[in-house]
Amino acid sequence: MLTKRIIPCLDVKDGRTVKGVRFEGLRDAGDPVALASRYAREGADELVFLDITATNQKRTTLVALVRDVARELDIPFTVGGGIGTVADVEALLLNGADKVSINSAALHRPELIDELARRFGSQCIVVAVDARYTVENGWQVYTRAGTHNTGHDAVEWSREVAERGAGEILLTSMSNDGTKDGFALDLTGAVSRAVSVPVVASGGAGSKQDFTAVFQQANADAGLAASIFHFGEIGIAELKQHLRADGIPVRL
């Protein structure tokens, strides 16, 4: 049985790690380089770095900062934000990223997923799916840092990106993000059943039990969180001990 992964996320704006609720009300959470170093020491399985304003500001990801963070890590490192071309991906991989996460660019031109998978290998390509729930439309996909509704059904879009060659899906429930009310188990479970690639659940983690639930009930391959780690509410080591006690395979 494959071990389940615990992944801290650095949402970066203006060179600082920030965290909000449902993508709004951002507050400072610290220096991304220092946080990356801490998480590597504490036993994180991977790290995700998202430049959350790159797309809306129509610029590429902060390559120099990515390079500084990568120097602190000996674990897999995923970078996203403002990535839209083969050249963007190449620059990040050359500066320390192990994987890249694309979102808006993939929705704008889905063929980009195929091109990147052929060029760099599916193992390097993560597609981020940001979804929000409404009673009228169910779970739909949003882009541009959660400001634009694409009209795509989240499960159908996840299925398409996997078929196009994405090696992993980073699935964020915008409805749960920052609330600490738990992951969106219905959404995560539906996507996990629909695709054959790993699904990273994101949005809503507030307790150790939330991770148990997303692994046992929704079959996520990894659980991603930010504020509970940034602000010391839950330690990665104690979380993994809890999961091991619940019978969930994790790397200690």
Image (cartoon, helix red, strand yellow):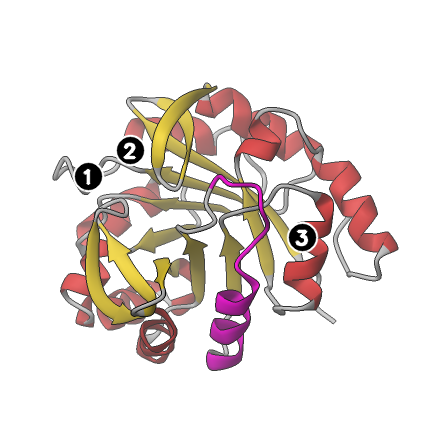
State left or right for residue 87 relative to residue 37. left
Q: Amino acid at mark 1?
A: Thr
Which residue is label 1 attached to? 60
**Mark 1 touches mark 3? (CB < 8 Å):** no
Mark 1–mark 3 Cα distance, whole angstroms, equals 33 Å
Q: Is residue 152 above or below residue 244?
A: below
Residue 16 percent coordinates (x, y): 38, 21
How many numbered discs, if any?
3
Q: Earlier in the sequence, mark 3 or mark 2?
A: 2
Residue 206, located in which quarter of the rendered image?
top right
Q: Amino acid at mark 3?
A: Phe
Which residue lies most toward the front here?
Answer: 135
Q: Which residues are magenta?
A: 178-194
Q: Which of these two is toward me, 197 or 104? A: 104
x 22%, y 37%: residue: 54
Which residue is label 3 attached to? 211
Q: Is residue 140 above or below residue 14?
A: below
Q: Is residue 101 above or below residue 3?
A: above
Q: Visible in this render: residue 159?
A: yes
Q: Which of these two is toward me, 17 or 148? A: 148
For residue 63, the mark is: 2
Residue 163 percent coordinates (x, y): 35, 80
For residue 41, the mark is: none
Residue 77 percent coordinates (x, y): 48, 44
**Mark 3 touches mark 2? (CB < 8 Å):** no
How many residues crowd around disc 1 within 10 Å: few (fewer than 14), some, or many (20 or more)? some
x 14%, y 62%: residue: 108
Q: Say which element carries label 2.
A: helix
Q: Say which element carries label 3.
A: helix
Q: Amino acid at mark 2?
A: Val
